[in-house]
Image (cartoon, helix red, strand yellow):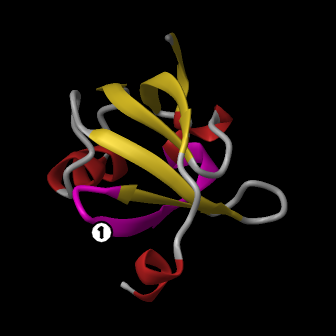
Amino acid sequence: MKKTTLTNLTVGEKATVVSVNGKNAITKRLMEMGVVPGVSVRVIKSAPFGDPLEIRVRGYHLAMRKSEADAIVVQSSKFKVQSSESEAKS
């Protein structure tokens, strides 16, 4: 398992949040929304240039800018999940 930022994950890849870097209002808001160390995240979609990025965290989908995702250090499990139609409807 290697540490990287959320931006570097591929679509479908799962990881665990290691840290959320920064002291601004955006990073504080991300943490309030459940992006905290120890939580599992999965990349759902990425726009053509990687901005914005959609992740699944704590049972809901969250879209964020690439600059915000760069502040989130994760530990990749190199486990890729295939998207299912039932999840796409939720």
Q: Residue at x 62, y 49 (%)?
A: 66
SS at mark 1? strand
Q: How crowded is mark 1: few (under 14 residues within 10 Å), some or many (20 or more)?
A: few
Location of the C terminus (image quadrant) = bottom left
> 62 above or below 22?
below
Q: How many discs mark residues in the rendered view?
A: 1
Instruction: State the image quarter where residue 48 is shown.
Output: bottom right
- Magenta stretch: residue 67 in it? yes
x and y percentages locating residue 31 in the rendered image: 22, 46
Frontmost residue, 50 versus 83 = 83
x and y percentages locating residue 57 in the rendered image: 31, 55
Frontmost residue, 68 versus 34 = 34
- Magenta stretch: residue 88 in it? no
Q: Which residue is drawn at 29% across and 51% down?
A: 30
Looking at this view, name the residue that lies furthest to the right.
48
Instruction: State the image quarter where residue 37 is shown.
Output: top left
Q: Residue at x 38, y 45 (%)?
A: 41
Looking at this view, name the residue that lies furthest to the bottom.
89
Task: Residue under label 1, please give it.
Answer: 60
Left or right: where 11 falls relative to 68: right
Left or right: where 31 falls relative to 15: left
x and y percentages locating residue 4 in the rendered image: 56, 20
> 23 above or below 50?
above
Q: Residue at x 44, y 88 (%)?
A: 89
Q: What residue type is labelled 1?
A: Tyr
Frontmost residue, 22 versus 79 = 79
x and y percentages locating residue 32 in the rendered image: 16, 53
> 67 above or below 17?
below
What residue range appears in magenta? Answer: 57-68
